[in-house]
Image (tube, grey):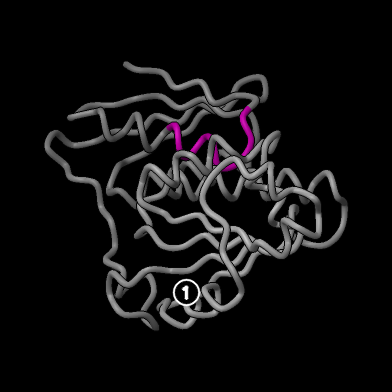
Amino acid sequence: MKVINNCGLSCPEPVIQTKKALAELEGGSLTCLVDNPISRENVLKFARSQGCTTTVSEEGGIFSIVITKTEGQPERAEPPEKRFPWTNAGAPTAYLIAADELGRGDGTLGQTLMKTYLYALSESQNTPGPLLFVNAGAKLTCQGSLHLPSLERLAAKGFTIKTCGLCLDFYGLKDSLAIGEITNMYAIIEALEQAAKVVTLS
């Protein structure tokens, strides 16, 4: 039985690794190891959403989740109209990223959350759309950014990455852009108006 060791990994990495392993499994079972209740519940929820059966045991603070998949069982994926009933099916979502950290509170946590969000988005099956970086969000697309690996994966999937030129100028980063292209507010407005839905990260 294949064992996926997700101990020490933070959300959403255990679910992502489990999803990859499950996609490669034609039938039978695999064991997912996690070391905290939140990861346990997230993995269980994902596995059950795919129609798999699960059993859980715990020893020494390590949870062993056995996930069983029927041979030939396809992955379940809700169509866009069910996941997002307020949008047109298959229409792109625009992401307006207006900060270099996610949420208000501790700055270190905010930076971690932003990194986690972009990583999770890069591993998702979302329809590619525009990623628009403004204000301090412009820092994320520049040289030295820890977010570049996730942004490169998103670009490879067809997401367009555009950063506000005025914002790059303000932070003295216009010559440091490492991915995507420079844009302007008029083009940003157009992209937002054409999107079926806008997700704002600030």
53 over 105 or under it: above or below: above
Q: Is residue 179 left or right of residue 75?
A: right
6 left or right of 202 in image? left
On the rendered structure, is 97 left or right of 100? Answer: left
**Picture layout, residue 26 above or below residue 109:** above
x, y (%) of residue 147? 62, 40
Rendered position, 100 above or below 148: below
Nearer to the camera, 31 or 165: 165
Quarter where residue 1 is shown: top left
Residue that mark 1 sits on: 191
Residue at image x 54%, y 65%? 95
Name the spot of residue 138 as percent of width and height, x first. Answer: 69, 55
Image point (43%, 46%), residue name = 155
Of residues 99 and 107, the one nearer the viewer is 99
Q: Is residue 12 magenta?
A: yes
Q: Residue furthest front?
A: 175
Quadrant of the drawing holding the C terminus: bottom right
Q: Position of residue 174 (x, y in %)?
A: 70, 50
The percent position of residue 90, horizontal first and vertical second, equals 28, 69
Furthest-left residue in this view: 72
- The magenta region covers 9-17
| Closer to us: 110 or 100 | 100
Asked if residue 126 lies in the magenta stretch, the reply is no
* Left or right: residue 21 compared with residue 109: left
